Amino acid sequence: MLNVLIVDDSLIIRKKLSKLIENLGHTVVADAQTGQEAIEAYATHKPNLVTMDITMPDMDGITAVKHIISDHHDAKIIMVTSHGQEDMVIKSIQAGAVGYILKPLTQEKLAQAIGEVFSEYAIEESDLLDDDF
């Protein structure tokens, strides 16, 4: 089970991500709506994983990733992004993020991204198949 920090300026996205993460058996230890809140929440909670929005009003996700990684070299951050932000994803990875999830969010996408970062949570393709062909 992972302890997860969710960072997104949208309350709806934070709630959806929280539900998806909990459905996968993990715990949301905190959420943040700004980059600055993310930096503070990471220092307080030291989560195993962060989901980070790229576009936020006070500090973008890339800048927040740089700050978190500079203080916590082993931080695992997955970016949550929309179509059309591919260049921002590359900058995020260069800043230290370990992966990304493309919106719209689904439990399968989230599980796959977590499995790519934490091999013990990797899912088999057969786990994603619906038994009701």
Image: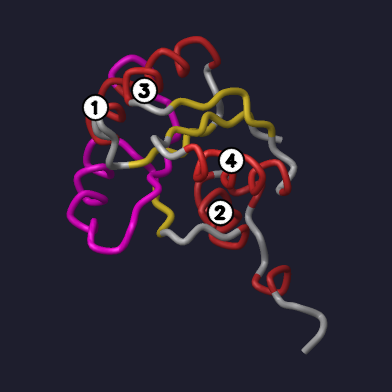
Q: Which residue: 32% across, 25% down?
A: 35
The circle drawn on residue 59 is 1
1 or 4: mark nearer the eye: 4
Rendered location of residue 130, percent (x, y): 75, 78
Residue 7 lies, with reference to residue 118, above or below; the image says above
Kind of residue sitting beneath label 1: Met
Mark 1 and mark 4: Cα distance apart in space: 21 Å
Q: Amino acid at mark 3?
A: His
What is the crowding at mark 1: few (fewer than 14 residues within 10 Å), some, or many (at least 20)? some
Q: Which residue is mark 4?
A: 15
Residue 53: image x %, image y %?
A: 37, 41
40 vs 27: above or below = above
Q: Which residue is mark 2?
A: 110
Residue stretch in magenta: 70-98
Say whether disc 1 or disc 2 marks the residue closer to the N-terminus: 1
Secondary structure of residue under mark 3? loop
Q: Quadrant of residue 79?
A: top left
Label 1 to label 3, Cα distance in Å?
20 Å
Of residues 79 and 76, the one nearer the viewer is 79
Residue 94 inside the magenta-drawn segment: yes
Q: Which mark is residue 73?
A: 3
Dot placed on the residue nearer the N-terminal end, 4 or 3: 4
Horizontally, residue 32 falls left or right of residue 66, namely right
Query: Which amino acid type is marked by label 4?
Result: Lys
Residue 86: which disc? none
What amino acid type should be assigned to the residue bearing mark 2? Leu
Q: Are marks 1 and 4 in contact (CB under 8 Å)?
A: no
